[in-house]
């Protein structure tokens, strides 16, 4: 916008200067023609009546003033008639000089006998006219610049508003919302932004189809693999009962059964993740305080039996969401803190308003997660090296993050100094 304004000002300034110079040159050319015509008339006068009659002629024409200024000097340079300043000119040709009335455009010629005759046009009136013209050009230029800037501002604002809508759509897509689409004008022919929106929407349609296909494949594979794994676990259970007489074999069977149970839990978590991402979004309001309180009380015995403590601080908060999914997310966050912190860790669960927006927060004073590893921790099946030996499938935080995105919320990992802080910031609920 600033560059446009500068370009407009320069363009109008250049146009004004060119117009002023052109008009000034045209006026001056007209004045030169008039002066030469008057000078020719005086030449005819002295040729018929003699050079000695010129002083009387000049005095008479000055008295009858026709817009011309005169100067007449003798061969010795003495003043004879007219304006003294013009009578003092002793160089033939055109010149601009200041006379009694102001600036005068003058032509001087040498007379027979050595005298000098000067005839000129007063430029004072022309200067006033040019000043008025300059002021008019400046005023017109200022109005033109203002109109152009206002038009550019309105056009740019309208364009940026449309680009902001497209950018807001891209932000929602980055948060996992593949159901949104960029707005397109339907009432007129598509422009460049509409074409960009159409391409963006086509890309989202393609991504949505690919994600749906991947989700179906994941779900089908999980279902298909779960059944034979369940049957295999049942066989291991029977084998374990049959091997009770051989403690070493029974112990190995129990270990295998635990491994298979962990695999089944992973498949269950993958199915749950696919169901979350493929289900419709919530519409009704739920009591986040009540859900968090119920989940915390259900997990409190396990947390305290492990040597850790749980503190729940609740404000009355409502959000638009699904009770079961929100409860699952809270449980995943608390279980994540339970699994990956040592005995003696203090775990804190908060439900609060943060700058007017509902927020759920789980904080502990354990080892935490380094900033460079937090994206890995949120990825499905993502596990840090320090947690490879702990139980779990690496889907707890991923499921909680998917639940947050599904609710239009945002899950973030932060440093609790010491420990880890996991927050889910919900959009403000509107009835």
Image: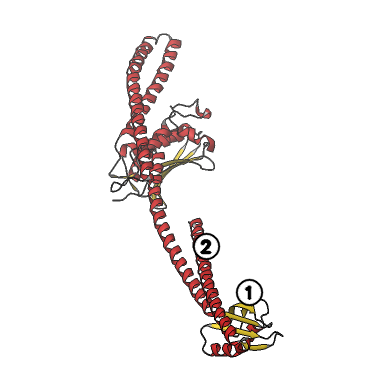
Query: Considering depth in this image, is 416 or 148 the residue closer to the camera?
Result: 148
Q: Residue furthest right?
A: 76
The location of residue 293, given as percent across then percent down, is: 36, 42
Q: Which residue lies furthest to the front in this view?
A: 48
Q: Residues within 10 Å of mark 1 (few under 14, many from 20)?
A: few
Q: In this view, does 146 lie above or below 127?
A: above
Q: Residue 93 carries which label?
A: 1
Residue at x 36% of width, y 46% of height: 191
Q: In this view, does 289 lie above or below 115?
A: above
Query: For the residues marked 1 and 2, what is the alpha-carbon distance in whole angstroms?
Result: 32 Å
Query: Considering depth in this image, is 307 or 321 the residue closer to the camera?
Result: 321
Residue at x 39% of width, y 51% of height: 159
Instruction: Give the structural element (helix, strand or loop) at label 1.
Output: strand
Instruction: Give the structural element (helix, strand or loop) at label 2.
Output: helix
**In the image, 92: left or right of 241?**
right
**In the image, 73: left or right of 176?**
right
Tell me, yes or no, whether the two marked residues, 1 and 2, touch with CB atoms within 8 Å: no
Q: Which mark is residue 379?
A: none
The location of residue 163, given as percent across then percent down, is: 40, 48
Residue 286 visible to an observer of this rendering: yes
**In the image, 327: left or right of 112?**
left
Q: Is residue 62 above or below residue 183?
A: below
Earlier sequence position, callout 1 versus callout 2 = 2
The location of residue 372, given as percent across then percent down, is: 54, 36
The location of residue 275, given as percent across then percent down, is: 32, 31
Residue 306 visible to an observer of this rendering: no
Point out the frontmost of discs 1 and 2.
1
Query: Considering depth in this image, is 12 or 226 the residue closer to the camera?
Result: 12
Q: Residues within 10 Å of mark 2 (few under 14, many from 20)?
A: few
Q: Residue 14 carries which label?
A: 2
Q: In this view, does 418 lie above or below 275?
A: below
């Amino acid at each position: 916008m600033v560059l446009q304004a500068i370009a407009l000002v320069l363009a109008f300034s250049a146009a004004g200067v060119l117009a002023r110079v052109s008009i000034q040159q045209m006026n001056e050319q007209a004045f030169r023609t008039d002066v030469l015509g008057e000078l020719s008339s005086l030449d005819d006068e002295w040729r018929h009546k003699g050079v000695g009659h010129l002083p009387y002629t000049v005095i008479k024409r000055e008295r009858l003033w026709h817009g011309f200024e005169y100067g007449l000097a003798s061969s010795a340079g003495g003043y004879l008639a007219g304006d003294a300043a013009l009578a003092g000119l002793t160089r033939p040709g055109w010149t601009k000089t200041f006379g009694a009335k102001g600036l005068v455009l003058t032509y001087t010629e040498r007379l027979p006998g050595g005298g000098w005759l000067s005839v000129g046009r007063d430029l004072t009136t022309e200067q006033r006219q040019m000043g008025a013209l300059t002021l008019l050009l400046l005023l017109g230029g200022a109005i033109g610049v203002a109109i152009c800037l206002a038009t550019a501002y309105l056009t740019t604002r309208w364009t940026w508003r449309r680009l902001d809508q497209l950018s807001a759509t891209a932000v929602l897509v980055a948060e996992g919302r593949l159901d949104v689409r960029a707005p397109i004008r339907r009432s007129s022919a598509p422009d460049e932004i509409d074409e960009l929106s159409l391409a963006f929407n086509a890309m989202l349609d393609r991504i949505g189809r690919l994600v749906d296909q991947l989700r179906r494949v994941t779900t089908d594979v999980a279902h298909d693999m779960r059944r034979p794994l369940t049957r295999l676990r049942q066989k291991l259970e029977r084998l374990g009962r049959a091997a009770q007489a051989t403690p070493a074999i029974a112990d190995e069977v129990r270990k295998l059964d635990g491994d298979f149970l962990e695999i089944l839990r992973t498949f269950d978590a993958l199915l749950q993740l696919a169901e979350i991402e493929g289900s419709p979004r919530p519409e009704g309001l739920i009591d986040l305080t009540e859900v968090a309180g119920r989940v915390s009380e259900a997990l409190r015995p396990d947390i305290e039996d492990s040597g850790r403590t749980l503190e729940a601080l609740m404000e009355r908060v409502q959000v638009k969401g699904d009770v079961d999914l929100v409860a699952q997310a809270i449980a995943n966050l608390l279980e994540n803190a339970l699994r990956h912190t040592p005995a003696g860790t203090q775990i804190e669960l908060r439900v609060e308003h943060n700058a007017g927006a509902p927020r759920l927060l789980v904080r502990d004073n354990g080892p935490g997660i380094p900033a460079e590893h937090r994206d890995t921790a949120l990825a499905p099946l993502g596990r840090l090296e320090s947690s490879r030996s702990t139980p779990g499938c690496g889907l707890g935080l991923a499921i909680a993050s998917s639940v947050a995105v599904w609710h239009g919320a945002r899950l973030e990992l932060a440093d609790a100094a010491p420990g880890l802080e996991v927050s889910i910031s919900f959009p403000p609920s509107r009835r």
